[in-house]
Amino acid sequence: MNHDPFNTRVPPPCIVDTGIVVNKQDMLRVLGDLGRVRYVHWYGNQLHSEGDGYIMEVFADPNRSTLIANHGIYLNVCSFDCLELQQAPDSQSYFDLIQEGQVLRLIPLSNPLQDRAARQIETSTLEAVLREVISAKLDAEIDDEGPLLF
């Protein structure tokens, strides 16, 4: 702990499950792992649209739009003032992206821990298949042409 009375630098916040995120890099990190989501878009107090989609890309670019089309969601964190992390009474997390009278709520339909484990299994399976294919190819070359000479 820093006890320097002249140090006026405020440490960054620690947000656990609920809170407001305004830093664009932090917003990128939180939203980047969402995967499949249910989205609800309010403009003012009126429901504008809702549906299910997959987070295809999360980026920060002041010249590009946030787009939701054909179940694909392309989120530009620059389109929003802040990200509010919240939990429903059933402990389900959801994320409200807020910008001047509009709210885009994202409710995760997938679990990043399960998704990451599935990707690791897929990668391991792919590596094993590739090893078998390379080994079979080498065996076939040896059978057809005799020993390989280098």
Image (cartoon, grey):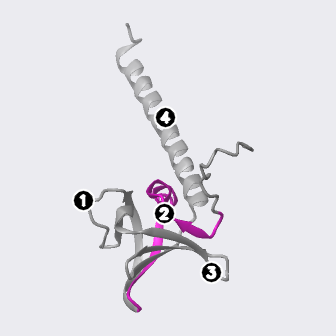
Mark 4 or mark 1, which is nearer the start of the sequence? 1
* Residue interval drawn in magenta: 16-45
Q: Tag 1: Cα neighbours inside 10 Å, few (<14), some, or many (≥20)?
A: few
Residue 88 disc label: 3
**Which residue is pictured at 47% across the width and 72% down the height?**
37
Label 3 vs label 2: CA separation?
Answer: 21 Å
Q: Residue 41 location, x and y as percent? A: 39, 82
Q: Residue furthest front?
A: 6
**Which residue is pictured at 26% across the width and 61% down the height?**
64
* Nearest-to-viewer mark from 3 and 2: 2
Quadrant in the picture for the N terminus: top right
**Which residue is pictured at 60% across the width and 59% down the height?**
114
Describe the element under mark 1 as helix, strand or loop. Answer: loop
* Nearest-to-viewer mark from 1 and 3: 1
Mark 2, residue position: 22
Q: Residue furthest left?
A: 63
Label 1 vs label 3: CA separation?
Answer: 34 Å
Residue 63 disc label: 1
Describe the element under mark 2 as helix, strand or loop. Answer: loop
Question: Hey, what amino acid is under mark 4?
Answer: Glu
Q: Tag 2: Cα neighbours inside 10 Å, few (<14), some, or many (≥20)?
A: few
**Marks 1 and 4: CB-CB under 8 Å?**
no
Question: Hey, what amino acid is under mark 1?
Answer: Asn
Mark 3 or mark 1, which is nearer the start of the sequence? 1
- The answer to whether residue 138 is magenta is no
